[in-house]
Structures are given as C-alpha cells and as structure tokens.
C-alpha cells in the first residue's frame, strides 16, 4: 500500500533499536568524552545518527506533496 | 526553597505570559480560514501546517512542560535509569517516519479528524471506534492535569502562593483555545520552543562553568548516589530490561495519544511528517541535556522538599532573577501548548466518535465545531478540579495507567494500514484483554510501571504496558484466526 516502493534501505530504520535497546552493551563509564561517561555520550550520539538514517531513507521516498 | 516574592522574575514571567495570551487570541486570524465554525479548521487548523509549523507544534506538544520538570527530577532521584526518556524519544522517530504518513493519508482521504474516525471507516465497527475514542479521552485527561503540575511548580518557585495564579492561567488558556482552536497552540509553540531552546542552551553552557565542568558534575552525582545507597550514574544489570522496555513501550504509545495524532493530522502532507521525523530529534538532544540538570542539582547541593523542584530551584539558585523568570515563563508557557492541544484532541474524539456517533448523527459542521469547543473547555475544567481537589499522586497514577491504556489502541489504529486480515471483534478482544490484564498487573504491583514475570528460577522485570500489548496482540491474532473468514473483505487496505 505505501506509495513509495519498499527498498532494503528501509532496514536502516531498525539500527537505532539495535543500538539503544540492549542497554548492557553501553552501560559503562569509559571511554569518556568531554567529561561525559560512555553511557551518556553514546546515547546522545544516536540522536544525530538516527536523524541521518531517517534522512537517507527519506531521500528514497517520492515526495507526495 | 524560599517563598519570597521575586519581582524581577515575576515581571519577566508576567510579560511573556501576557504576550502569548495576546497571540492566543490573535491566532484566530492567522492563516485566516473562511470560517472557524468547522471542526477541520478549529480542531486541525485547516490541515495546512507545513514543515516548520508542524515541527514547532509537535515539538511543543510532545516534549511537554511536565517533561522538562519530571525527567530531570527522575534523574536527580534515581540516576541513569531516569535517562530512558532519551532512547525513548530517539526510537520513536523511525516509527513515526514509517507509519504516520500512511495514517495521515487515510485520514486526509476520508476527512477523518481522529484515530477513532479512521478505525470506524476501516472496520465499520461502532464498538471498536468507541473503544479507541474513550481510551484516548481517558488517557489524555491526567496528561492535562500533569501540565498543571508543571505550571504549579514554576508558580511556586516565583514565590506566588495560593491557587489563584494557576486558575487564572488556565482560564486564559481555556478562553483562547475556545476561540482560536489549534491555531492558538501552533502559534504560541514558536515562542515557547524558542524560549526553551535558549534556556537549555544557557543552562548546559553556564551551569557547568559555575559548577566545575561535566566530569566533576558526573563524579559528584555518583558520590551523592553512593552516599544515599541507591541509584547511580550507570544502570544496575537488573535495570537493563526495564530501561529498554520502558523506552520501547513509551515510543510505541507516544503517537497513539490524541494530542500527538492531532499534530500529525494537522500537517499539510505525508512528506511534512517524514521531514519532521528527520528534524524532530533536535528536541531529543535538548531533552537529553536537560535531563543532566538532575545531576547538576546534586553538585549545587540543593535542599529540596520534593524532587520535582530540582529544575526551578536550580535556576533560582544559579541565575539572576530575570533569567530565572524567563526560564519559568518558558516552562509555564510550555504547559499551555500541550494542554491546549490535548484538550483539542480529546474534544475532537468526543465530538466525532461519541456525540456524532450516538447523540446527534446529523450534526452540522458548525454544530460539530461548537460541541468540540465546549468539550475542550469542560476537559480543562475537569483537569483543573482534579489538581485542586485531589492528591497529586492521583494524577500521576492515572497518567501511568493512561500510557498503558493508550498503547492498547495501537493494533486497532495501526494494523489496518498494512493488512486487511484483521477484523473488528478480534481487535476489540485484544484491546479488552491487554487493557484489563495490564491494569490488573499494575494495580497488584501498587501502580508501578514495572511488572516481574517469573519463569522457574529466572525473573524478567519489564514495562507493564508493553507486556499488556503483547497479550493484546496475541489475543487479537488468536481470535482473528479462529473467526470464520469472509469470502470478500470489506474495504481493502486503501
């Protein structure tokens, strides 16, 4: 039903879920960055990463405006 | 905290409050429609909001004043665990990107105003429509009450006592929402969000300078948790699953609420929503940094009567009165935007899916707008009465249950976008099962968001809303599979 064809590119949208839902993988203090323990900067870093991933998929979707 | 009147702070606060009040009433003329006496205009702003308006509106509506107060308060109280709001507000966007443009398209094509409209058109079932509508209304009421709690916290920090300021603020809000509809919060959101961005950027830049840098802030917070014997700046291994399930469950629930869906339906196009899924995470960055104010509260050695006071007291302690007033105005106005959109979302549901469905099916377009306006007023008065006369804990408990309940509408609202296999009785059975089991578990656990499942020796503690959703989907699948299949499906996926 989606107007835009489904492409494997859409799988990129799953990466934030893998990156963030296994808390054991990033629940540590080192290495720190600008005083932020790893736990904090790693999760904050996923904000721009997610934006970019969504943008990549966005470009492949036809504009329906 | 002291209760002395802080005149510079109060002046700045009152100035911005008056500014947005004027804007709220002027909004009726903004992007002027032929008539506001139509629910598409009053309740959805004419479905014409482009990328930037939608960004401000959904941003202002999803990241509420209560969030600004509550997330740092939770981080102050328990540490890393309170940070689940960050993964939550990241993983919500791939979901929004993939699903919400489809929902928008269905709503636009069918002139649907609410999620329950979409469900009714899809399944031709009045019971399923009513289930979705009532769940939405009931889940939204305590959410509005929470915005009042956020506003009450900053009014208290200004040194104002009594309930008159709160009542006054809400009265003003109710009046301009009544007259301008969704245009009012959309216009005010520009001011609110700009102010919040300024406040947070100043706070995260200057507070560490005053308190000795981020490394010191984290170290001091860690020491404070160790001294207290609970919490910490990293998760305990037993918190991994609660952390992840709370983030995931909250992300799925977030865009089932009437206020977020109102923002989605008010957009001009599916593409507007897609662009916003790319751009809205900017607010998440803000929220993540804001959460750290909770740790800064430890370093500043604040003496608090309640964790909820951490943000207001931190600003009062570290900044001059006028800037504290600016910050409090940002939070106070931050309460008005979501409260307005929430009351509009609930009013749309009542008008379309209760009034039009059961009371007066022949209601005119102007009549619909009238009912919605009056309902939005009643919803807000109801929330105000809850805050004035019932314990705060009541609103908090209801809000927790509200999240669990609204999540149970997901299969009915979303599944039909992708397949025509599901039928109304199955979805209704799943909704009822998830809702009742989830509420039962939550009630038995003393209204806590987490439930522990025991399989032999292993225990799994997870977010009860997500658990209820799993039960909901399992029951839906089972009932649907057992039902005799029709030869021809009514209404294909599009």
Image: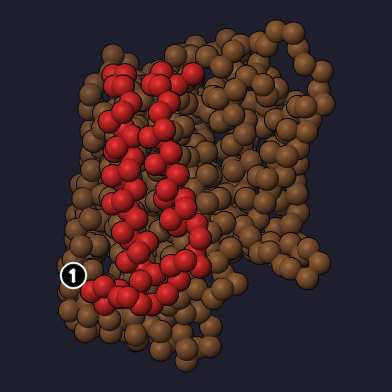
Chain colours: A red, B brown
Q: Residue at x 23, y 68 (%)?
A: B204
Q: Residue at x 75, y 46 (%)?
A: B436
**Is A1 or B147 nearer to us in this picture?**
A1
Picture coordinates of residue B416, whole percent (x, y): 59, 24
Picture coordinates of residue B482, whole percent (x, y): 82, 26
Q: Secondary structure at mark 1?
A: helix
Quadrant of the frame with the N terminus of chain B = bottom left
Q: Is residue B338 left or right of residue B145?
A: left
Q: Chain of mark 1?
A: B
**Is B204 or B214 nearer to us in this picture?**
B214
Q: Is residue A35 left or right of residue B130?
A: left
For label 1, the residue is B205
Q: Is residue B202 left or right of residue B351?
A: left
Relative to B60, residue B304 above or below: below
Q: State which quadrant residue B267 falls in.
A: top left
**Is B181 or B225 nearer to us in this picture?**
B225
Q: Residue at x 59, y 43 (%)?
A: B407
**How many other residues sit within 10 Å of disc 1, few (<14), some (14-19) or many (≥20)?**
few
Picture coordinates of residue B344, whole percent (x, y): 44, 34
Relative to B103, residue A41 above or below: below
């Amino acid at each position: 039903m989606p107007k835009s064809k489904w492409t494997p590119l859409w799988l990129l949208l799953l990466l934030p879920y893998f990156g963030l839902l296994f808390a054991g993988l990033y629940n540590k203090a080192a290495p720190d960055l600008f005083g932020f323990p790893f736990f904090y900067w790693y999760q904050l870093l996923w904000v721009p990463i997610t934006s970019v991933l969504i943008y990549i998929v966005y470009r492949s979707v036809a504009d329906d405006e | 905290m002291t209760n002395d009147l802080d005149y510079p702070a109060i002046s700045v606060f009152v100035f911005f409050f008056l500014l947005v009040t004027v804007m709220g009433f002027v909004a009726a003329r903004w992007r002027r429609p032929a008539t506001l006496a139509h629910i598409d205009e009053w309740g959805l702003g004419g479905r014409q909001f482009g990328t930037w308006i939608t960004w401000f509106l959904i941003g202002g509506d999803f990241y509420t004043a209560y969030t600004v107060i509550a997330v740092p308060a939770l981080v102050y109280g328990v540490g890393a665990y309170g940070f689940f709001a960050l993964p939550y507000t990241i993983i919500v966007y791939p979901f929004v990107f993939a699903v919400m443009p489809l929902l928008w398209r269905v709503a636009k094509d069918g002139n649907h105003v609410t999620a329950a409209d979409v469900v009714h058109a899809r399944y031709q079932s009045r019971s399923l429509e009513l289930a979705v509508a009532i769940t939405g209304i009931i889940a939204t009421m305590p959410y509005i009450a929470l915005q009042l709690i956020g506003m009450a916290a900053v009014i208290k920090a200004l040194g104002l006592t009594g309930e008159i300021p709160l009542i006054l603020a809400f009265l003003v809000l109710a009046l301009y929402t009544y007259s301008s509809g969704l245009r009012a919060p959309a216009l005010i959101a520009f001011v609110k969000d700009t102010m919040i961005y300024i406040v947070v950027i100043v706070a995260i830049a200057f507070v560490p300078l005053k308190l000795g840098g981020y490394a010191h802030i984290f170290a001091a917070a860690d020491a404070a948790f160790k001294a207290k014997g609970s919490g910490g700046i990293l998760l305990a291994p037993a918190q991994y699953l609660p952390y992840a399930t709370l983030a995931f469950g909250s992300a799925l629930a977030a865009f089932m609420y009437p206020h977020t869906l109102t923002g989605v339906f008010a957009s001009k196009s599916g593409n507007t929503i897609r662009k916003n899924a790319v751009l809205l995470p900017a607010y998440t960055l803000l929220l993540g940094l804001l959460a750290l104010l909770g740790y800064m509260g430890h370093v500043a050695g604040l003496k608090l009567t309640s964790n909820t006071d951490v943000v207001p007291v931190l600003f009062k302690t570290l900044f001059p009165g006028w800037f504290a007033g600016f910050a409090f105005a940002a939070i106070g106005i931050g309460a008005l935007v979501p409260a307005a959109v929430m009351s509009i979302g609930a009013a749309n549901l009542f008008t379309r899916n209760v009034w039009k469905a059961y009371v007066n099916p022949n209601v005119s377009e102007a009549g619909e707008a009238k009912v919605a306006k009056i309902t939005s007023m009643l919803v807000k008065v109801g929330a105000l009465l809850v805050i004035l006369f019932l314990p705060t804990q009541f609103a908090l408990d209801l809000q927790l249950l509200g999240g669990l309940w609204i999540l149970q509408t997901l299969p009915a609202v979303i599944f039909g976008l992708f397949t025509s296999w599901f039928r109304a009785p199955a979805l209704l059975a799943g909704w009822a099962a998830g809702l009742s089991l989830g509420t039962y578990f939550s009630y038995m656990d003393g209204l806590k968001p987490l439930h522990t499942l025991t399989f032999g020796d292993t225990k799994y503690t997870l977010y009860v809303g997500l658990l209820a959703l799993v039960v909901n989907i399992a029951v839906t699948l089972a009932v649907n599979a057992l039902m005799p299949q029709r030869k021809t499906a009514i209404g294909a996926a599009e």
